[in-house]
Amino acid sequence: MNKSENHKPIVTRFAPSPTGNLHIGGFRTALFNYLYAKHFGGKVVLRIEDTDRERSKPEYEKNIHEGLEWLGLKFDETYKQSERSAIYSQYVSKLIAEDKAYVSKEEITAEDIAEAADPKAKGAKKRSEVIRFRNPNKVINFYDIIRGEISVDTTELGDFVIAKGIDEPLYNFAVVVDEFEMGITHVIRGDDHIANTPRQILIGAALGAHMPIYAHLPLILAPDKSKLSKRKGARSLTEYRDDGYLPEALTNFMAMLGWNPGTEEEFFSRDELIKRFDVAQVQKAGAVYNEEKLRWVNREYLKRKPHVEIATAARPFFERSAEFQKNGWSISDGHMMKLVPVLLDRINVYTDITKMVDDHEFDYLFGQPEYDPKDMIWRDETGPERTKEFFEKVLEILEAAPEESFKDSESVKSLIWAYATDMGRGAVLWPIRFALTGKMKSPDPFTLLTILGKKEGIKRLKHAHKLLA
């Protein structure tokens, strides 16, 4: 095989096993297959590898489809290995008939089966009959787009098991038949599958199948450089969805995990990724997963969203809060829209909203806050009498202002900024801010007056003025 792309239409595949939820490592593999195929105008196949009957579950298969659909990966063809048993049986029989495989009547241990099966397979029992591949015991050479030329002496593999029986193919055999039947030209997968490649090449040659071009992706690493796992930060795609990550942000982040276009650019649309992606630029070393970086990327994408879209998407994260539900709160569409600038200033991902509500950061939205009036005083030298004067003047200004002056924070700011500057910004603005929320930390008073509106804002400032009497 030469190093150049062949002239056939490129066909890649993503082949998850429904033995667990689809995690980000699987998504990156799916994404790289998708981007590479579409870059060349080819197609990408989804193949559910559910031959492990004991561990494959319908709920995991559903999770795979849900995660990929949320991220917008559309496949040109979809297959399930469990629906292809007759095809595998034909090929097993063909190899036996050609004396390239044989029925071995012997005691086969769980280790023998696992050696030839999917590395994740467990619990194989002792058997008295299996199908072994007749190994030609030769050196094979193949080209890996990421790792270059690889040479393996297959003699040490011996005559390895390819099926538990005519109707029970093992992982390595079923995969080769599928690549052949589906016309897969490029196999892009994790480098934990490199050990399977020599066996698969031998089987493919025996079947008269073409040898696909391989690209083995480096592992995604946890921050401590160990393999990323569920215990060390790996989460299912649907967890990211439920936490309110944006699919385009997660796609961009995962595309850049182990690959870059050779420039300082960081943000790409799906079409731009398709145009720029080259699997040959994937680094050989493992890429370290950094959730804080993902949160930052998500925040950057949030900033690009229309405010009405953010207001709509943010609402469920208010409503799922335990505090929100316990208190029977409600929030209007108008308040949601006015809150968007505050949210964009505070959150990286929508689920941050739920935590903020449960931490009482938004209590002021739902009623008059309670507080110690002493906390309204900017500094001791200002005193309550002086603070009362500030309230009186600000109230005078706000009551005289038309309703449209409360449409945004800049309009409100223009009403009282000059007075605050003359009198001392902290001395004037701090009491207003605290009176509106009852909190030491909150948005600026102009934003708060915009969110609460003229009527409610004035009501709270009058209440504060009265407390100082």
Image (cartoon, rainbow, N blue to C red):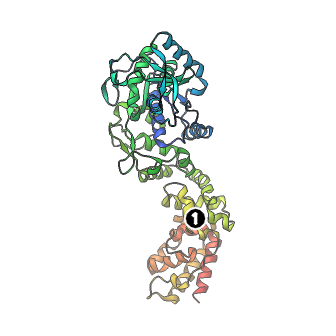
Q: Nearer the viewer, residue 89 or 283?
A: 89
Quadrant in the picture for residue 402: bottom right
Q: What residue is drawn where x is 53% and y is 74%?
A: 439
* Quadrant where the N terminus is found in the figure: top left
Report the label total: 1
User: Is residue 60 found left or right of 276 in the rendered image?
Assistant: right
Q: Nearer the viewer, residue 219 or 138?
A: 138
Q: Position of residue 180 (x, y in %)?
A: 48, 18
Q: Position of residue 311 (x, y in %)?
A: 59, 55
* Quadrant where the C terminus is found in the figure: bottom right
Q: Position of residue 457 (x, y in %)?
A: 61, 73
Q: Position of residue 365 (x, y in %)?
A: 61, 68
Looking at numbered disc 1 in the image, what kind of residue is underneath it?
Answer: Val
- Outermost residue on the top side: it is 98
Q: What residue is drawn where x is 59% and y is 82%?
A: 464
Q: Is residue 148 visible?
A: yes
Quadrant in the picture for residue 68: top right
Q: Is residue 278 visible?
A: no
Please tell me how crowded label 1 is: few (under 14), some (14-19), or many (20+) other residues with Cα within 10 Å. some
Q: What residue is drawn where x is 49% and y is 61%?
A: 346
Q: Nearer the viewer, residue 362 or 449?
A: 362
Q: What residue is drawn where x is 58% and y is 64%?
A: 357
Q: Where 345 falls versus 39 (above or below)?
A: below
- Secondary structure beneath disc 1? helix
Q: Check disc 1 and report the residue beneath it.
A: 357
Q: Where 263 falls versus 177 (above or below)?
A: below
User: Is residue 373 found left or right of 427 in the rendered image?
Assistant: right
Q: Where 462 falls versus 410 (above or below)?
A: below
